[in-house]
Image (cartoon, grey):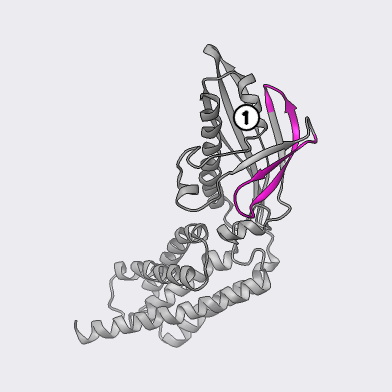
């Protein structure tokens, strides 16, 4: 390793350490100022990673000779450090890290690409670095003045079951004893840690009744029935009266938060020839974030996996 390469390596490590310390300060400020939605913000998701990665890339290349590829690899290095700190120090959940990573990589690459283009034009490196670190702090002051749009989305899945609507209807009312191994494997629940249903029990009959859902230790919620057509359809609104249990999975992914609200859902039964039935499950949610389209992609995956698991459970019970 040449003297210059060794110096660049040391500068890179020092810059990443400084960037992590600064990110920790911003993290603490956002958590204190907006505990319900601070981290789901334009500043934290997009501005901060772009600024930090640009800072690290510039500090690591004092001779302004590194390649574009080296600059674009900086966000990968920074993200690896952020993930390590998030898991072992901040105790963030897997889901939060998975959601964060693509945005941090893309915005970080944008920041380093811009710095690569500007590096030879920068006359005062200290001023440039100070400016980079100032940008997220300024964004934090401006963002509360911005109202992000609220978008509604519906996730739908269906399955064909070899059973009649009459056979299926009691299962849609609630399965109180979901056994380990029932349902189907999926990425969201088996890898990322979204809770699996343990059981559900209907209290009452018809519109206005309540289904009590149990999704594991300290994760319970109510579903208020809004549509009741035996053998045809059932629908409900979600009521998350006590969301403390969800924090064990990921405290920044609550189903009834400032930026995410899971509103309602339901099953619909369509008879098919041969005694079969198509079972359709839908869930509607609202997202209020600076990246609603991005949120929608993850919503399709997460809720889609949850629905596929529930439909597989219904089919397994009905086809016994």
Q: Is residue 50 visible?
A: no
State the image coordinates of residue 66 (x, y, percent, origin top left). 28, 75
Q: Residue at x 61, y 60 (%)?
A: 247
Per the image, is 49 magenta?
no
Q: Quadrant of the N terminus?
A: bottom left
Q: Is residue 169 visible?
A: yes
Q: Is residue 108 left or right of residue 213?
A: left
Q: Residue at x 53, y 64 (%)?
A: 45
Q: Is residue 298 left or right of residue 259?
A: left
Q: Residue at x 43, y 65 (%)?
A: 110
The image quarter containing residue 185 is: top left
Q: Is residue 21 left or right of residue 241?
A: left
Q: Which residue is mark 1?
A: 171
SS at circle 1: helix
- Residue 284 sits above or below residue 29 on the image: above
**In the rendered structure, which segment of residues is drawn in magenta?**
208-233
State the image coordinates of residue 9 (x, y, percent, origin top left). 30, 81
Q: Residue at x 43, y 63 (%)?
A: 105
- Residue 269 sits above or below residue 28 on the image: above
The image quarter containing residue 112 is: bottom left
State the image coordinates of residue 24 (x, y, percent, origin top left). 53, 77
Which residue occupies the extreme left position in the image?
1
Which residue occupies the extreme top position in the image?
274
Closest to the observer, 13 or 282: 282
Closest to the observer, 167 or 83: 167
- Residue 153 sits above or below residue 22 on the image: above
State the image coordinates of residue 213 (x, y, percent, origin top left). 66, 43
Q: Main secondary structure of the magenta part?
A: strand
């Amino acid at each position: 390793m040449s003297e210059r390469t060794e110096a660049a390596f040391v500068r890179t490590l020092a810059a990443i350490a400084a960037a992590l310390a600064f990110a920790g300060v911003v993290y603490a400020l956002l958590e204190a100022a907006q505990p319900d939605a601070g981290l789901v913000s334009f500043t934290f998701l997009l501005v901060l990673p772009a600024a930090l990665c640009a800072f690290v890339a510039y500090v690591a290349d004092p001779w302004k000779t590194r390649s574009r590829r080296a600059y674009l690899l900086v966000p990968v290095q920074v993200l690896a450090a952020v993930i390590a700190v998030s898991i072992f120090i901040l105790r963030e959940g897997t889901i939060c890290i998975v959601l964060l990573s693509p945005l941090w990589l893309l915005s970080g690459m944008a920041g380093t690409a811009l710095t690569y283009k500007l590096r030879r034009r920068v006359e005062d490196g200290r001023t440039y670095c100070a400016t980079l670190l100032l940008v997220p702090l300024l964004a934090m002051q401006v963002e509360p003045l911005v109202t992000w749009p609220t978008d509604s989305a519906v996730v739908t899945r269906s399955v064909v079951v070899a059973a009649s609507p009459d056979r299926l209807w009691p299962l849609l009312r609630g399965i109180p004893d979901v056994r380990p191994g029932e349902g189907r494997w999926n990425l969201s629940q088996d890898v990322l840690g979204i809770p699996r249903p343990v059981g559900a029990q209907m209290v009452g009959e018809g519109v206005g009744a309540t289904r009590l859902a149990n999704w594991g230790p300290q994760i319970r919620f109510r579903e208020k029935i809004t549509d009741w057509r035996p053998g045809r359809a059932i629908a409900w609104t979600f009521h998350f009266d006590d969301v403390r249990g969800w924090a064990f999975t990921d405290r920044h992914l609550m189903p009834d938060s400032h930026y995410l609200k899971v509103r309602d859902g339901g099953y619909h039964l369509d008879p098919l020839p041969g005694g079969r039935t198509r079972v359709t499950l839908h869930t509607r949610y609202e997202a209020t974030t600076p990246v609603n389209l991005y949120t929608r992609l993850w919503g399709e995956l997460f809720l889609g996996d949850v629905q596929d698991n529930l439909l597989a459970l219904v089919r397994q019970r009905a086809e016994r």
